[in-house]
Image (tube, grey):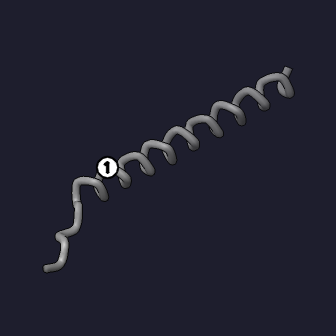
Amino acid sequence: MARKPNYGYEKRQKEIARKAKKEEKSRRKREAKSQESPERD
């Protein structure tokens, strides 16, 4: 008998990946902002 797929695990992994991607994006934005500010002064 074939094992049924663990959809809960897959969903959790997707959510973790999405969260990591979002954090990476916001971190890059912050870095870009912090690099721009000193140059303008």
Residue at horizontal 19 percent and vertical 72 percent from the top: 3
Q: Relative to 3, is 40 on the left or the right?
A: right
Res 24 → quadrant: top right
Front one among 9 and 31: 9
Q: Relative to 29, is 37 on the left or the right?
A: right
Q: Name the residue under label 1.
A: 12
Res 33 → quadrant: top right
Amino acid type assigned to the residue bearing label 1 in the image = Arg
Res 41 → quadrant: top right
Residue at horizontal 22 percent and vertical 68 percent from the top: 5
Residue at horizontal 28 percent and vertical 54 percent from the top: 9
Work out which residue is located at the far bottom of the displayed protein and give it. 1
Residue at horizontal 86 percent and vertical 27 percent from the top: 39
The picture places residue 38, in percent across and down from the top left corner, at 83, 22
Secondary structure of the residue carrying tag 1 is helix
Figure check: 32 above or below 5:
above
The picture places residue 34, in percent across and down from the top left corner, at 73, 27
Q: How crowded is mark 1: few (under 14 residues within 10 Å), some or many (20 or more)?
A: few
